[in-house]
Image: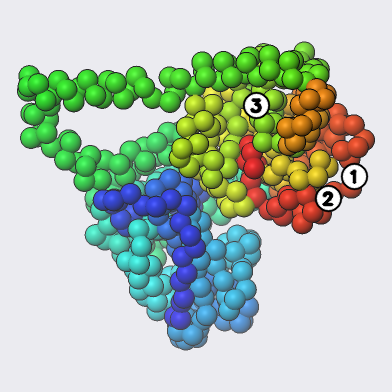
Amino acid sequence: MAIAYHSSSMPNQPPPGLPAPIAIDGPAASGKTTVGQALAAEFGYLFLDTGLMYRAFALAAMRAGIDATDAAACEALAASLPLSARAGSETRIFLGGEDVTAELREAAVEGNVSRYAAIPGVRAAMVARQREIAASAPAVLAGRDIGTVVLPDAPLKLFLTASEEARAVRRAEQQHEDAARALRDIHGRDTSDSNRKTAPLARADDAIEVDTTAMPLDEVLAFARARVIALMPAVRAAASPAAKAAAGAPAPVARAVGVVRAAKGWFSYARFVPPFYWGCTYLLRFVLMVVGRWKATGREHVPASGALIVVSNHLNNSDPAIVGAGIAKRRIRWMAKIELYKYPFGVAPRLWGAFPVRRFDADIRAMLQAERILKNGEVLGMFPEGHRSRTGFVGKPHPGTALIAYRSGATVLPCAIIGTEQLGNPLNLLRKPRIRVAIGPPFTVEKVRRPSQQQVSELTERIFSEITALLPAKYLPAYTDPGKDGNAADGGDPASS
């Protein structure tokens, strides 16, 4: 098979001693892709969903009118198919330059991929290329025969499993279909994958099995992350018998190490975030009353507890702090663009409790962090425009906020920032500018783990309309041109530009 492979820029620089490659196997809807993408995003691996390669072959064969019963024709197609996989923290598949990733989850492909994947010549071509990919860079490969066939010597092998019923529910949510039909499909896929003669689905003898039936996603990810860290050389050395014996010796060095570790824990960012945040918040309220005509309205709308997403327009770099000063009742955790975390200025967003997001990219780690914040009943702050306005007008909203709202089922609190565009010119402070935070009534969102594009679009529009309803007319032209107001055409929801 003529398969090209291109790696996109990896989200993080892989740390030294990273265990690689990593093999993740398991049946359909067991969580392989989610875990693989999360590990890739956190540690800087490439992620390859090998199942997408087989799906792409099935799609190409069906387009060519080649049935899976014609093994010779399938193997001939495999030898010449221009299939390319592009991966960073996720995988995209191309056929002759056409991005077919979205088509690979369609029912026709889903129902036929096992038949094509069972053909020995097709699997041989795929396996050879998958091994080349794994050798090219630190990588996580997810599939059904990675630990047994593709990467039998991988230093870390995970085998994810779950009951058919639990996986059927997940698949039904993903595909927006009936759970009973999903159960039939999964049962049929399991039977086909487990009984095929070539590379059947099976757990490698040295694989770590993880049953995700009743295991929350956070726990699964924490378990996988811990297994990666445990295999890094420095961690293995610290866990060796010699290291343990040295640590237990009543020597001055051991005591000094203990003191250093205790001091490091005491001086962690987490310890100082609450006092830093609230100190800055109330100091800012005082400063705003001194230098400007400051007012916050609608504070009675702020829920006293529970998961909450604060959404607002974005006019100035100071907006996150000013929205926090306006709400004041609860601490807000904002997404902040990753560029802000460069030293020496990176200490400020860390102390303020913000967390980084890679704009204009599918930042899985930031998405998971946002979901963890909401799962803990905290407050998440987001700017649906994705970038501060350069003109003062509101810009076109992006779907990231709506997607997180659906996945978490959190309450949404619309806010409006008014007047902060004047802070761009220090001379305006002499005129005591009017600065106001208007807080609107909250609304709840029904939890949907895999919302449709239409659902996300409709909620994005609702969030936008709730924000603009709180703004004066001067901020409200039609959707502004991204080229004029500085808004990007795609991306996340950073706290500041």
Label 2 neighbour load within 10 Å: few <14, some 14-19, many 20+: some
Mark 3 or 1 closer to N-term?
3
Query: What residue is shown at x 77% (from left), y 20% (from top)?
Result: 292
Residue holding disc 3: 321
Q: In the picture provided, is 284 more to the left or to the right than 242?
A: right
Rate crowding at label 1 as few (under 14), some (14 to 19) or many (20 or more) other CA atoms within 10 Å.
few
Q: Is residue 348 above or below residue 251?
A: below
Q: Amino acid at mark 2?
A: Thr
Q: How is the structure coloured here? A: rainbow
Q: Quadrant of the C terminus?
A: top right
The residue furthest right is 473
Among the 4 quarters of the image, the one containing residue 101 = bottom right
From the image, which quarter does the N terminus lie in?
bottom left
Q: Which residue is mark 1?
A: 477
Give the left or right position of residue 320, taking residue 71 as reference: right
Residue 108 position in % (x across, y down): 63, 65
- The answer to the question of whether label 3 and label 1 lie on touching residues, with beta carbons closer than 8 A, is no
Q: CA distance from mark 2 to mark 3?
A: 25 Å
Q: Residue at x 54, y 45 (%)?
A: 339
Residue type at mark 1 is: Pro
Q: Position of residue 420 (x, y in %)?
A: 76, 31
**Contact between labelled residues 1 and 2, with CB atoms less than 8 Å apart:** yes
Q: Callout 3: 10 Å neighbours few (<14), some, many (20+)?
A: some
Which mark, by number, is residue 24? none
Residue of label 2: 480
Residue closer to the observer: 143 or 133: 133
Task: Write down the quadrant of residue 251 in the picture.
Answer: top left
Q: Is residue 360 above or below residue 247?
A: below
Q: Residue at x 24, y 24 (%)?
A: 260
- Disc 3, SS: helix
- SS category of the residue bearing label 1: loop
Which of pointers 2 and 3 indicates the residue nearer the eye?
3
